[in-house]
Image (spheres, rainbow, N blue to C red):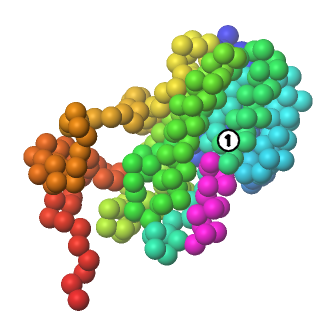
Amino acid sequence: MGILDGKAAVVSGAGRGIGRGHCLHLARNGASVLVNDIDAAEAQKVVDEISAEGGKACANAADIGTREGAAALIGECVDAFGGIHALVNNAGNVRDRSFLKMSDEEFGDVLRVHVHGTFMCSQEAARQMRAQASGGSIINTVSAAHFGNFGQTNYAASKGAIASMTYTWALELARYGIRVNAISPSGSTRMSSTYRGPDGKEVELPFIDPTRNGAFVAFLCSDDADWISGQIFGTGGERVVVVEQPKYGTGMYRDEGWSVEELRERFAGHLKTHLEPVGLMKNPYPFYDGVKPPEK
């Protein structure tokens, strides 16, 4: 008996890497899995792996960045397996470029897949889960890149948006028994190979098995995790880490409010040492000497 026996799951962008690992773990724990990837051949390879282990899976090549593709994805899961109980929004793309050089197309293409795709697939899945009166689990994918990362305005913005959608959907969908969480996975993939350091230069990262995120995903999809919603977790490698949600931190208060002169006089003394570090690597606050234009 598996903890996901009788459940049907969809994983988008699952032909390789992290998504493949999700599919394998879901199937090994009893779920029937719809493996989505725009590369149909890669999706079928994952299906064949699952079938060879005695699991149940089907391949799907829908473009989840369109409403038609999202609807077809969820509809095929219902047709093949009789319903849907879990959706893992894993599909993504990158179009890295520094901010001043990024084109409208590069910005929009990444948001289309990450933000619009996550929104549309989740809406289609949640509507079906509500109609089934079965409850369910939606798992989104974010990234530490939304803390800020060189050359990834589009990707960082997408992941920040997905984090905020996760919190909102957890509140709205709880009444239907639908839980919404997200993971910030680690793993060596084609996308991680594009990583740049704070100086914009290539960085050689150690190999991390991308399939090691899948066990936690399977757990979140199970009834054992029916009390977990609205959370983001760092996963993969050796870790399961709660990602703290945005919150108000240290502040200063004045009954009459703040004038410009009061701010000039008091801001540095009260808050200067509390300014947040910037970027993925969270180095100490780097701008105490001022951010100034180049000397002419």
Classify residue 109 as left or right of residue 94.
right
- Residue 125 in the image: state x and y as whole percent: 75, 31
Q: Main secondary structure of the magenta part?
A: helix
Q: Is residue 142 visible?
A: yes
Name the residue located 73 percent from the left edge and 39 percent from the top edge: 121
Q: Residues within 10 Å of mark 1 (few under 14, many from 20)?
A: many
Q: In the orientation shown, which residue stands out farthest toward the right?
A: 79
Q: Which residue is mark 1?
A: 119
Classify residue 86 as left or right of residue 210.
right
Mark 1 is on which residue type? Phe
Q: Of residues 246 and 53, which is closer to you in this image?
A: 246
**Which quarter of the picture shows residue 264?**
bottom left
Name the residue located 52 percent from the left edge and 38 percent from the top edge: 164
Classify residue 294 as left or right of residue 79.
left
Q: Which residues are magenta?
A: 103-115
- Queried whether the magenta region covers residue 33, the answer comes back as no
- Residue 33 in the image: state x and y as whole percent: 74, 31
Name the residue located 47 percent from the left edge and 60 percent from the top edge: 152
- Residue 102 in the image: state x and y as whole percent: 53, 71
Name the residue located 74 percent from the left edge and 19 percent from the top edge: 7
Q: If the image is split into quadrants, where does the N terminus sit?
A: top right
Q: Of residues 282 and 53, which is closer to you in this image?
A: 282
- Queried whether the magenta region covers residue 110, the answer comes back as yes
